[in-house]
Amino acid sequence: MNGLYYLPLGGTDEIGMNMYLYGYGPEGNQRWIMVDCGIGFPDEGVAPGIETMTPDPAWIAGQRDKLDAIIITHAHEDHIGAIGTLFDKLKAPIYCTAFPAEIGRRKMEEAGHSPKNIKVTEPNTPVQIGDFEITFFPMTHSVPETSALIIRTPVGTVFHTADFKIDPDPIYGSTMDKEALRKLGEEGVLALVCDSTNVFEPGRAGGEKTIQDSLRKVIAGCKGKVAATTFASNVARLKTLADAATANERAVIVAGRAMSRMIQAGERTGAAAGFSDTITEDQARDLPNENLFYLVTGSQGEGRAAMARIASGTHPVVSLERGDTAIFSSKTIPGNEVEVARIYNKLVERGVEVIDSSMADIHVSGHACRDEIEEMYLLLKPKYAIPMHGEPRHLAEHAESALKWGAAQSFVVTNGEMLHIAANGPRKVDEVHTGRLYRDGDLIVGAQDGVVRDRKRMALNGHIAISVILDDDGQLVVESDVRATGAPKKTGRKGGTFEEQIAQAVDDAIESMPAKKRSDDGALEDMVSQTARRKANRLWGKKPETVVFITRLEDD
Ligand SMILES: [Zn+2]
Ligand SMILES: [Zn+2]
């Protein structure tokens, strides 16, 4: 019998790397659509050297002939960021509206795929994909042109909110059409799959325009140069900042390609047209400091972004000094506090005044707070609640609250769990493999492949390489050679350097080994490695990673 299935592969154990599958058909032989294909940013401590990660789509990639579409709700990296890197594995047409399409085409090109794989859809115009009828429904959020999805199937309708807030008077685009949602609710909504990011925040997120006055006042109080940062994709905020600067007779300079690209995409697609006039960095040279306003990237403390480089005095164009001001029109995402604090401190050390959203009303969230989430339930009256876009604690809180907001049942479904959404009661029917893929330099590796695990062990305990040279009787030809990296040189004990003492221990062990065992490379390697680690532990209190090279010389 045909049924409707929901299976998140990413986005429901974390805030980030969103990837949700919806299936329709007989159990075990459904056809699928993917909603969003995003990246996440792992913690440096968890995955050193890894800047971005994606969900591991192996389960659906292994049956990609059954994947009919990838649907992108909006242009945030946690929703669109992986379309280029994962396209090879998925090879399904990508559907989205004009603004995310503009951003997505570039990602496809960068990954060596044809941008023609992206099909531009119109809001409020249904697209039929297999048994799914999908309508992109305009929502307000912190990037232009965000769409919720009305997913109609033969067994009922799912409303997938994507990321949203309810901004009654947005800067770009129109406000959420509550009347249309009320009608949809009357038609009947089987399940609401809903953003959980701000489920712990009471009240409402607040409209983008509510911070205009406050930003204007803050900038009016600044004396020297001003550099303001926010997410590059928040074109409405960039406009709010630019307008507030212009009102204070400051010329606006956009420093950084990521921001320029977003503004241009907004202009080209019409999703965020009419951005304030800006001047180039060259034109800015002739203006006095009090007439300058820079829009820069790096609100989350990203090491290579403009604000970090300004803070360390290494930005090629923008320099802030005593009397200048840095404005963070943003909220620090949990996990980035240390990096952001480091940049604040560096700026303050330079004599720069730092103003953030804890000191003035210069930021509103892009995600619905409790009252707005509740409003979605009241409008749509879904039978079932399925929280998404959250860590387990967000999902659990949301699932409990949904019952108070009128849902008959709610389900916490986390990455890899398959829910059969049936009118007579959903149930979990399967658990599939999911995980994380890391982008490591130019390559993609599995989080479990051992690359990052080995790197972490080396970072914590150092590494030693041991070269052992034997003749064909299994006797040592020379003393073994040890090279240690990330380990001490001296040990504070008699008997030579750290390397020398390990080499001595290895040679003693080899000589006391029975000749037969010594002729077996595997046994010899294990013994050398164990001896070296044991000796290192005695000298240093740590067991380094080891690699052993065995050379056997032929007698002629
Ligand atoms: Zn998101
Ligand atoms: Zn978003």
Image (cartoon, rainbow, N blue to C red):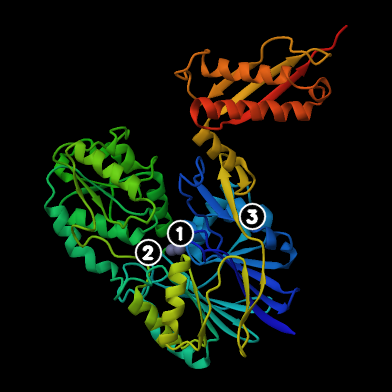
Q: Amino acid at mark 2?
A: Ser
Farthest bottom residue in view = 186
CB of mark 1 within 8 Å of CB of mark 3? no
- Measuring from the top left, give residue 504's x and y in whole percent: 62, 16
Chain-order first, disc 3 or disc 2: 3
Q: Does the residue tagged 2 have its C-beta within 8 Å of any atom of ligand 2?
A: yes
Q: For the residue labelled by badge 2, is the local secondary structure a helix, a strand or a loop?
A: loop
Disc 2 + disc 1, Cβ < 8 Å: yes
* Residue drawn at x 51%, y 40% as measured from the top left: 49
Q: Is residue 551 left or right of residue 297?
A: right
Q: Earlier in the sequence, mark 2 or mark 1?
A: 1
Residue 83 visible: yes
Residue receiving disc 3: 87
Task: Tell me the quadrant of the picture where the C terminus can be found.
Answer: top right
**Residue displayed at 54% across by 82% down:** 191
Q: Can the viewer see residue 180?
A: no
Front one among 387 and 22: 387
Q: Secondary structure at mark 1?
A: loop
Circle 1 packing at 10 Å, graded few (<14), some (14-19), many (20+), is many
Queried on whether the Cβ of the residue with tag 1 lies below 8 angstroms from ligand 2, the answer reads yes
Hey, which quadrant is residue 434 in on the image? bottom right
Residue 139 tag number: none
Q: Which residue does the numbered mark 1 point to in the structure image?
A: 76
555 above or below 34?
Answer: above
Residue 495: give x, y in percent of width and height.
Answer: 53, 13
Mark number for residue 142?
2
The kind of residue tagged 3 is Phe
Q: Earlier in the sequence, mark 1 or mark 3?
A: 1
Question: Which amino acid type is shown beneath numbered disc 1?
Answer: His
Question: Which quadrant does ligand 1 occupy?
Answer: bottom left
Residue at left 52%, top 88%?
383
